[in-house]
Amino acid sequence: MKDFFRHNGILILIAAILLALVTAVVSMLFGGVADPLSNLVGILTTPVRNGITAVTNWAEEKYNDAFELEQMKEELAGLKQRNAELEAQAREAEAALQENERLRNLLELQPKGVVLRQGRRHGHRPLHLQLGVHPHHWQGQRCGDCRG
Protein backbone atom coordinates (compact mmCIF):
# COMPACT_ATOMS: atom_id res chain seq x y z
CA MET A 1 0.00 0.00 0.00
CA LYS A 2 2.90 2.35 0.81
CA ASP A 3 4.35 1.66 -2.60
CA PHE A 4 1.09 2.54 -4.33
CA PHE A 5 1.01 6.05 -2.80
CA ARG A 6 4.75 6.55 -3.35
CA HIS A 7 4.45 5.81 -7.06
CA ASN A 8 1.01 7.31 -7.69
CA GLY A 9 0.64 9.94 -4.91
CA ILE A 10 1.63 12.89 -7.07
CA LEU A 11 -0.79 11.82 -9.80
CA ILE A 12 -3.66 11.46 -7.33
CA LEU A 13 -2.95 14.92 -5.86
CA ILE A 14 -2.86 16.51 -9.32
CA ALA A 15 -6.14 14.79 -10.25
CA ALA A 16 -7.83 16.08 -7.04
CA ILE A 17 -6.69 19.66 -7.71
CA LEU A 18 -7.86 19.50 -11.33
CA LEU A 19 -11.21 18.08 -10.26
CA ALA A 20 -11.67 20.92 -7.74
CA LEU A 21 -10.77 23.53 -10.37
CA VAL A 22 -13.13 22.02 -12.95
CA THR A 23 -15.93 21.95 -10.38
CA ALA A 24 -15.32 25.59 -9.48
CA VAL A 25 -15.23 26.71 -13.15
CA VAL A 26 -18.39 24.77 -14.06
CA SER A 27 -20.15 26.16 -11.00
CA MET A 28 -19.23 29.74 -11.96
CA LEU A 29 -20.31 29.25 -15.56
CA PHE A 30 -23.69 27.83 -14.70
CA GLY A 31 -24.46 30.41 -11.96
CA GLY A 32 -23.82 28.27 -8.91
CA VAL A 33 -22.99 29.69 -5.54
CA ALA A 34 -19.70 27.93 -5.19
CA ASP A 35 -17.37 30.70 -6.34
CA PRO A 36 -13.79 30.30 -5.12
CA LEU A 37 -13.78 33.45 -2.97
CA SER A 38 -16.90 32.37 -1.06
CA ASN A 39 -15.45 28.91 -0.59
CA LEU A 40 -12.20 30.39 0.76
CA VAL A 41 -14.08 32.69 3.16
CA GLY A 42 -16.23 29.74 4.29
CA ILE A 43 -13.18 27.57 4.83
CA LEU A 44 -11.49 30.27 6.91
CA THR A 45 -14.52 31.35 8.97
CA THR A 46 -15.98 27.91 9.76
CA PRO A 47 -13.39 27.01 12.40
CA VAL A 48 -13.73 30.47 13.98
CA ARG A 49 -17.54 30.17 14.08
CA ASN A 50 -17.28 26.68 15.54
CA GLY A 51 -14.83 27.93 18.18
CA ILE A 52 -17.08 30.85 19.12
CA THR A 53 -20.07 28.49 19.33
CA ALA A 54 -18.13 26.10 21.54
CA VAL A 55 -17.01 28.90 23.89
CA THR A 56 -20.55 30.32 24.03
CA ASN A 57 -22.02 26.90 24.83
CA TRP A 58 -19.36 26.33 27.50
CA ALA A 59 -20.04 29.73 29.10
CA GLU A 60 -23.81 29.12 29.05
CA GLU A 61 -23.31 25.70 30.63
CA LYS A 62 -21.16 27.22 33.39
CA TYR A 63 -23.76 29.95 34.02
CA ASN A 64 -26.52 27.32 34.26
CA ASP A 65 -24.38 25.25 36.63
CA ALA A 66 -23.75 28.30 38.84
CA PHE A 67 -27.47 29.20 38.82
CA GLU A 68 -28.45 25.63 39.73
CA LEU A 69 -25.79 25.64 42.45
CA GLU A 70 -27.30 28.79 43.98
CA GLN A 71 -30.76 27.23 43.86
CA MET A 72 -29.44 24.08 45.52
CA LYS A 73 -27.72 26.16 48.24
CA GLU A 74 -30.98 27.99 48.96
CA GLU A 75 -32.90 24.71 49.03
CA LEU A 76 -30.27 23.18 51.32
CA ALA A 77 -30.55 26.13 53.71
CA GLY A 78 -34.34 25.74 53.78
CA LEU A 79 -34.03 22.01 54.36
CA LYS A 80 -31.52 22.55 57.18
CA GLN A 81 -33.92 24.98 58.84
CA ARG A 82 -36.83 22.55 58.43
CA ASN A 83 -34.65 19.75 59.80
CA ALA A 84 -33.79 21.84 62.87
CA GLU A 85 -37.49 22.56 63.42
CA LEU A 86 -38.34 18.87 63.11
CA GLU A 87 -35.53 17.92 65.50
CA ALA A 88 -36.85 20.45 68.03
CA GLN A 89 -40.33 18.98 67.66
CA ALA A 90 -38.90 15.50 68.10
CA ARG A 91 -37.10 16.59 71.29
CA GLU A 92 -40.33 18.11 72.61
CA ALA A 93 -42.24 14.96 71.70
CA GLU A 94 -39.61 12.82 73.42
CA ALA A 95 -39.85 14.97 76.56
CA ALA A 96 -43.65 14.68 76.43
CA LEU A 97 -43.39 10.91 76.01
CA GLN A 98 -41.09 10.68 79.00
CA GLU A 99 -43.44 12.84 81.06
CA ASN A 100 -46.39 10.69 79.98
CA GLU A 101 -44.51 7.56 80.96
CA ARG A 102 -43.62 9.07 84.34
CA LEU A 103 -47.23 10.10 84.95
CA ARG A 104 -48.49 6.71 83.78
CA ASN A 105 -46.19 5.03 86.28
CA LEU A 106 -47.45 7.32 89.04
CA LEU A 107 -51.07 6.61 88.15
CA GLU A 108 -50.55 2.86 88.16
CA LEU A 109 -49.58 3.12 91.84
CA GLN A 110 -53.10 4.24 92.71
CA PRO A 111 -56.09 1.85 92.65
CA LYS A 112 -58.35 2.49 89.72
CA GLY A 113 -61.89 3.69 90.16
CA VAL A 114 -64.30 5.56 87.99
CA VAL A 115 -66.32 8.38 89.49
CA LEU A 116 -69.29 9.59 87.56
CA ARG A 117 -70.51 12.94 88.81
CA GLN A 118 -73.98 14.25 88.44
CA GLY A 119 -74.83 17.89 88.68
CA ARG A 120 -75.29 19.49 92.11
CA ARG A 121 -78.76 20.66 91.20
CA HIS A 122 -81.69 19.29 93.12
CA GLY A 123 -79.50 17.76 95.78
CA HIS A 124 -77.82 15.18 93.55
CA ARG A 125 -74.68 13.58 94.89
CA PRO A 126 -71.72 12.16 92.96
CA LEU A 127 -72.33 8.67 91.65
CA HIS A 128 -69.50 6.18 92.29
CA LEU A 129 -69.01 3.17 90.07
CA GLN A 130 -66.88 0.76 92.10
CA LEU A 131 -64.37 -0.66 89.66
CA GLY A 132 -61.81 0.04 92.29
CA VAL A 133 -61.74 2.39 95.19
CA HIS A 134 -62.54 6.07 94.97
CA PRO A 135 -59.21 7.91 94.61
CA HIS A 136 -59.85 9.85 97.85
CA HIS A 137 -60.53 6.67 99.80
CA TRP A 138 -57.71 4.48 98.61
CA GLN A 139 -55.63 5.24 101.68
CA GLY A 140 -58.58 5.21 104.03
CA GLN A 141 -59.18 8.93 103.66
CA ARG A 142 -62.64 10.32 103.64
CA CYS A 143 -63.81 12.52 100.83
CA GLY A 144 -65.51 15.72 101.94
CA ASP A 145 -67.67 16.12 98.85
CA CYS A 146 -68.63 12.44 98.60
CA ARG A 147 -70.96 12.63 101.61
CA GLY A 148 -70.90 9.01 102.02
Image (spheres, rainbow, N blue to C red):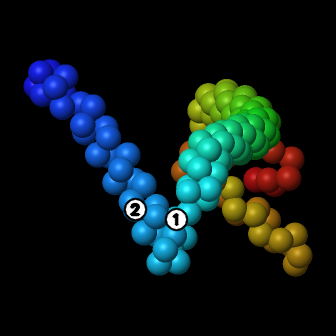
Q: Could you say which quadrant of the image residue 71 lies in?
A: top right
In this view, the mark in front (1 or 2): 2
- Residue 66 spot, x, y in % from top left: 75, 37
> Which residue matches tag 1?
34
Q: Amino acid at mark 1?
A: Ala
Per the image, label 2 sits on a secondary structure element best described as helix
Q: Is residue 115 left or right of residue 144?
A: left
Considering only vertical position in the picture, is 30 above or below 48? Answer: below
Give the Cα separation between the discs numbered 1 and 2.
Answer: 9 Å
Residue 79 is at least partly visible in this image: no
- Residue 68 spot, x, y in % from top left: 71, 43
> Which residue matches tag 2?
23
Q: Residue at x 47, y 78 (%)?
A: 30
Considering only vertical position in the picture, is 92 above or below 38? Answer: above
Q: Residue at x 18, y 31 (%)?
A: 8
Q: Is residue 82 left or right of residue 130?
A: right
Q: Is residue 121 left or right of residue 82?
A: right
Count all numbered tags in the image, as a single digit: 2
Give the mark, 1 or 2, whose residue is nearer the N terminus: 2
Q: Residue at x 19, y 22 (%)?
A: 6
Looking at the picture, tell me which residue is in the foreground, 50 or 77.
Answer: 50
Per the image, label 1 sits on a secondary structure element best described as loop
Looking at the picture, tell me which residue is in the foreground, 66 or 55.
Answer: 55
Looking at the picture, tell me which residue is in the foreground, 49 or 94.
Answer: 49
User: For the residue carrying disc 2, how many other residues have a C-alpha within 10 Å: few (<14), some (14-19), or many (20+)?
Assistant: some
Looking at the picture, tell me which residue is in the foreground, 117 or 54.
Answer: 54
- Residue 113 spot, x, y in % from top left: 61, 48
If the image is split into quadrants, where does the N terminus sit? top left
User: For the residue carrying disc 1, how many other residues have a C-alpha within 10 Å: few (<14), some (14-19), or many (20+)?
Assistant: some
